Image: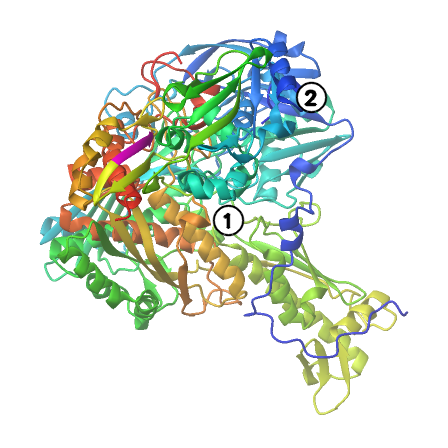
Amino acid sequence: MTMVEEPATTAPAREVGQSRKRKEDARLITGKTTWTDNMVLPGMLHLAVVRSPVAHAKIANVDVSAAQQAPGVIAVFTGRDFAEEQGSIPCAWPVTPDMVNPGHPSIAVEEVNHVGEAVAVIAARSKAAAMDAVELVDVDYDQLPVVLDMEAAVAEEADLCHDHVESNESFAFVFDAGEAGTGVDTEQVFADAEVVVSRRFVQQRLIPAFMEPRAVVVQPQGDNYTMWSSTQVPHILRLMLAMVTGTPEHKLRVIAPDVGGGFGGKLQVTPEEVISLLVAKRLGKPVKWAETRSESLMSAHHGRDQIQYIDIAADREGNVKGLRCRILSDMGAYLRLVSPGIPILGAFMYVGIYKFPAYRFECRGVFTNKTPTDAYRGAGRPEATFAIERIMDELAVELDMDPLELRRKNWIGAEEFPFTTAAGLEYDSGDYEGATQQALQLLGYDELREEQRRRRESNDPVQLGIGFSTFTEMCGLAPSRVLGSLSYGAGGWEHASIRMLPTGKVEVVTGSSAHGQGHETAWSQLVADELGVPFEDVEVLHGDTSISPRGLDTYGSRSLVVGGAAVVNAAAKVVAKARKVAAHLLEASEDDLEFANGSFAVRGTPGATKSIQEIALATFAAHDFPEGVEPSIDADATFDPVNFSFPHGTHVCAMEVDTETGRVEIRKYACVDDVGTIVNPLIVEGQVHGGLAQGIAQALYEEAVYDADGNLTTGTFVDYLVPSAADLPHFETGHTVHPAPGNPIGAKGIGEAGCIASTPAVVNAALDAVRHLGVSDIRMPLTPERVWRAIHQGGDGGDRATAGTNAYGGAQTETTAGVATDASALGGDR
Amino acid sequence: MIPAPFAYVRPTTIDEALQAVADGGEDVKIMAGGQSLIPVMRLRLAAPETVVDLGRVTELRGVRDDGDAIVIGAMTTHHDVLVDPLVAQHAPLIAEATETVADRQVRARGTFGGALAHADPAGDLPAVALALDAEFVVAGPGGARRTVPAADFFVDYLTTALGEGELLVEVRIPKLAGQWGMHYEKFTRVAQAWPIVAVAAVVRRENGAIAEARIGLTNMGPTPLRASAAEAALAGAAATPDGIAAAARSAAEGTSPSSDLNAQADYRQHLAQVLTRRAVTAAAGL
């Protein structure tokens, strides 16, 4: 046979550690790929969803007759039409045994519970015809009281978000270190404490705002259904669709083609995915649903939205003694896939990097008539990090200590790893002092402190502040047993397989479904090193349950740490299998073979070598194979680590505050992250920048705002402010490297670190600039108005007006879909 | 999102355009660059029956010297305004403000006249036109022309003096004689956003004092406004930081700004004062 190319003869340089440009970017950036919304199938129908304009009401009547008769409309379905088969959107994380789940129909049947909830779906020959018919569906709503404020929702005699459940509380979760045996009695510590500082922090509601709006295509073929969806989780989606709709799992294939971002926002089983499947089933026709941006902002799940009551106890010397956290976490109107688990993921991170003897965490999940919340970049850990890093600054002020000195006094020393915290987690590795020293140098700390002093003395209208965040997080959502102990509905392993093709090229199948992270590049680098093949010879396949049959997808900074580890382990199995073949072909003992740079060589016999490519071809031919060995060197691996990994780092922000206008501007930002072994520095840098942008956005720009009637007034990007590069500073980044001991790569995870770490650094910096003016807190986002009010009127800046800006005619949702009452943002009938 | 169905007409001359507008009846909408109209149509906040697209009316484009004024054609794009030498020489304030309008893509399509006729109180150019005492040349049914001073052009929220069947043709910017300085001070939360408040200042200095100041306010009410009290206080005031600061304190007099996510009314009024001080200071060359 002559089909094989000349095998690579020169040893490739080690790939891991190289800033390879991403092999997927050419097609992603130029659009030479098929996004879900680009799919066109013969006879395909287009769906448009009719959404509730009211936040809470009984559905008295749905009249679809006019819509049914509209040009191009094939069918219109309401919740009643699917009541028997739509089941409930699944919640896979019952965080307590008695958690209340009111049930979540994909199309509302009796009652709507948030603006934007689906009440009917149109199937038409064109997208335009479907959208035109939306306005023809006439729904009568009997309005009910609207529950919007969490503190009011859990008060006595509150109005109910769902009248068939007893209260607005879904669950009350408690972790107590004293009871768990990981700490001493928290109440006693607080009773005995010399100093206690208490604060109430508000984690505003955020919208993931992924770049590619969601889209679904379903193709029925006999009793089989193929779904293309812009999802992070094709494997979980397939399983859940089977369970929810009763479609047998083996009759469902889910494909996530190239997906344009997610940030947790596509870690979901959405009503629209269920609806699309049900309509395709009912009509026997392929269907497509693709959302508009304003539909996405209104109905795709939101993130954060917590009120945190944090108490910290310490002695006068600054030794922390205890931490007590009481959290209200807004679930929105329904429980989605992992809604209740989000605050619970944070439960174990509130102690941060500090050696607290005592710790207690209580969290109540609360229903409100708003869009459901669920995973958003960091998922529970940004909230925890914000709380601890903000309260450490407040404690420093109370004790009149330098905030860094207070941290240093209490953090885990480099020599103390592995360290088990009061929250019961075993931190793997790191050096907080080392990262901090490097970050201070990157920032030019001493000069900026000097400038801050000068500006204070001269009473400059522009004041300068410096804020810290010395954070850690838990990454690599995996250990299946740990997830099981937290009542999570699935495991956390990840799967990979490697197929050696006859030409020596390599197909890597990963269960970790990429949506922008660069898996194809990083996995290629890993495999190139393990198998000694050229980077270009590796193709990474993902995101299709038929091609990649086993997987748990991408979220929680788990891909490299868990999925990449599976790839490395699979490669090791390939080498082990190839070794037997090589020994046979070279007529040597396996023990005498060395594998390096993609070739087996017989020790002491120069020239006796077989490359992995030659072995792949020999395996394909199988003409001359060892006795009793099956002719395949392909291999699978499933990796399930025993522990999380714990990236850490020090982020330092220098902030200018214009005291005349309240405008804040980041002067300089430096961060040093320890993410363990770095496979691709370019990708890591990109993840850091993107994470910082999103973390800074929470501090300064983004907030999902509802008016008093429950209308989302930040319904377009005019009012939901996502910053661009023009709004962000240059980032000074650095790294320390302490490999993670829990996986073969040594990587810790980088997907969320920037987002988790940066928010408190930014807020701490702004407060440091104006604390001498009497400001002790400013609510996020730090709008110029809030900062100005905090400086000149006291308090935390207060509530914002809820009306959307009037620019280009008032683009807020209210005018398109919502109600206008005296209570709503614009008042009266508009 | 997809707009509701509409009829579309694309004239090539002003006369054809006027005829198309007349034929379009009550529910006709004139489209210049489309950078405001298309988004509201896509959101279905507007659903005109007929859209008259002026994109091919070439006689509406360009800037010319008309002796005591420069004349900017209504369909001149923001980009073309930005690179125009006459604008740079006689009305640099327009270029300065135009440069802050949205982003490069929007400036390539959006037009000077379209932005003014849209009369968004958060738009940058209406207050600038007001501060420069611009004159609006309007063509009516049959081709009749009339000229509307800027002070009379902006009537209410998204409403101008343009009557039914009328078309904004060009805008005359009077040339200024003497020692004038100009500055546009814009306050936003993010780049590319509409201003929360902005101030356009045009200042004439004489013998170390401020002889005359014209100040246009953006987003301080349903229409752009002149800060008349501050203008009066500045006339004859010393061109010093203290003099300007004292006058700027009256910048918000007579304004009625709205309250929205970005700012409540009292904060907008505070901003108007700070930004007026900064704009006048810069315009006065201090």
Based on the displayed image, in which of its 4 quarters is residue A626 positioned?
A: bottom right
Task: Tell me the amino acid under the disc marked 1.
Answer: Tyr
Residue furthest to the front: B67
Q: Chain of mark 2?
A: A
C-alpha gap between disc 2 and disc 1: 33 Å
Q: Chain of mark 1?
A: A
Q: Which one is earlier in the sequence, the residue at label 2 or at label 1?
A: 2
Q: Which mark is residue A24?
A: none
* Residue at the image position 68 percent from the left and 32 percent from the top: A218
The image position of residue A525, as x and y in percent, is 61, 66
Q: How is the image coloured?
A: rainbow
Left or right of residue A212: residue A166:
left
Return the residue found at the far right.
A1
Residue at x 41% of width, y 58% of height: A730
**Residue B183, percent from left and from top:** 34, 41
From the viewer's side, name the closer residue of B71 and A635: B71
In this image, A814 relative to A786: left or right?
A: right
What residue would you read off at disc 2? A282
Q: Is residue A717 left or right of residue A70?
A: left
Tell me the residue at 31%/39% (across/down): A783
* Quadrant that contains the N terminus of chain B: top right
* Disc 2: CA contacts within 10 A as few (<14), some (14-19) or many (>=20): few
Which quarter of the figure has residue B131? top left
Residue B199 in sight here: yes
In this picture, is A114 found above or below B277?
Answer: above
The residue that mark 1 highlights is A555
Q: Is residue B109 left or right of residue A91?
A: right
Main secondary structure found in the magenta portion: strand
> Which segment did they paint magenta?
B212-217
What's under tag 2, amino acid-wise? Arg
